[in-house]
Amino acid sequence: MTQTFTQIPEIALDWHRRGRGAVLATVVETWGSAPRPVGSQLVVSGAGEMEGSVSGGCVEGAVVEEAMEALTSHAAQMLEFGVADEDAFAVGLACGGRIKVLVEPVGTVLTEALLADLVAARAARKPVAYLVDLETGARRLAAGDTPALAARFRADKSGVEGSEFIAIHNPPLRLMVVGAVHIAQALLPMARMAGYDPVLIDPRPAFASPARFPGAKLVEDWPDAALEALAPDSRSAIVTLTHDPKLDDPAIQAALASDCFYLGCLGSTRTHAKRVERLGAAGVSPEKIARIHAPVGLDIGSQGPAEIALSILAEITRVLRQEGA
């Protein structure tokens, strides 16, 4: 993921503190085929600069104009954009889609202190919700301390409940790949495009080299030590690919001791059976072993490293979006 779409609150706080002015625009509701989901954000500076997107480009110009006015009026605005079917494709709101966008100037409506607390929670990888009462204008932060909020965190879904708009800010997704093999060369860029922050772990410099993985975050350490340092959480997926028990098994045990939402291990059914025996002999409980997805990936008849990587990412997505919902 690029900074544009993942660090909008951080950019807004930075621009405000540097005296450049900042207005946050957030998609609050959508109907029909909207180009950006609820929770998508755009930040506008006092000079008209912008980062992020609320509509893929079709209404950004109007939002920027309203944002500039909000900096002067110090008032929030709720904007609604809709389009008739015959004009839909021309502006990007296909199928007569409509969107509501909340515009909030930073420092007045959205206080610096509240935005700073939100940014701090995001930096600490703590799930946090930003709630706005659309009737009273009250604003606050909350953790998943109610069943409704907890469900929204699991589903990663912002939205309106009653009179409140709830913007979910989950920690960025991470993918930790153990083994700098050919599959990893395809999996890392795929994961990055899907919104993950990938990390490649392999203590063998000849394998985990910048030449083989340009631009990748590389950790040349033993997998168990690397995972301990990375501290996988409920927004982390882990995949082992080395085929070497000396590397994979310690990584698996470290993963099973964490809160990672997915653990997938490369190898045939026979290979996994041997793996289960080794883990059991090492004292790992059957309940923990059952968390392992092996053979890794969805069974889509994959052939070659790229298709195997595709099947792995597809399975991770299914676990995240369906089983975790």
Image: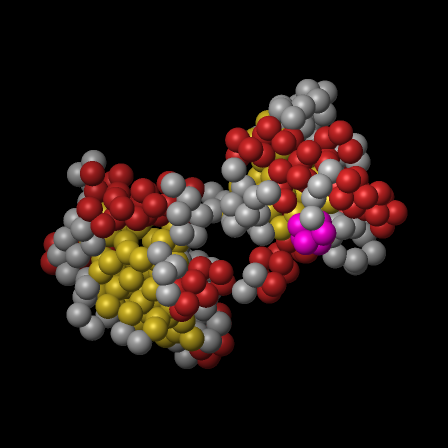
Q: Is residue 322 left or right of residue 46?
A: right
Say above or below: 163 vs 52: below
Residue positioned 52% across, 49% down in the render: 235
The residue positioned farthest toward the right in the image shown = 270
For residue 134, what is the image quadrant?
bottom left
Residue positioned 70% across, 44% down in the render: 284
The way the protein has been coloured in the rendering is secondary structure
Residue 173 locus on image (x, y percent)? 52, 47
Residue 127 vs residue 27, the one in the foreground: 127
Q: Is residue 33 left or right of residue 191?
A: left
Is 3 in the magenta?
A: no
Residue 131 locus on image (x, y percent)? 29, 62
Is 289 in the magenta?
A: yes
For residue 68, what is the image quadrant?
bottom left
Residue positioned 61% across, 63% down in the render: 323
Q: Which residues are magenta?
A: 286-292
> Can you see residue 270?
yes
Say above or below: 265 vs 250: below
Q: Is residue 151 left or right of residue 13?
A: right
Residue positioned 62% across, 38% down in the render: 254
> Can you see residue 27?
no
Residue 112 locus on image (x, y percent)? 19, 46
Residue 280 vs residue 44, the one in the foreground: 280
Residue 184 vs residue 105, the one in the foreground: 184
Say above or below: 239 vs 246: below
The residue positioned farthest toward the top in the image shown = 205
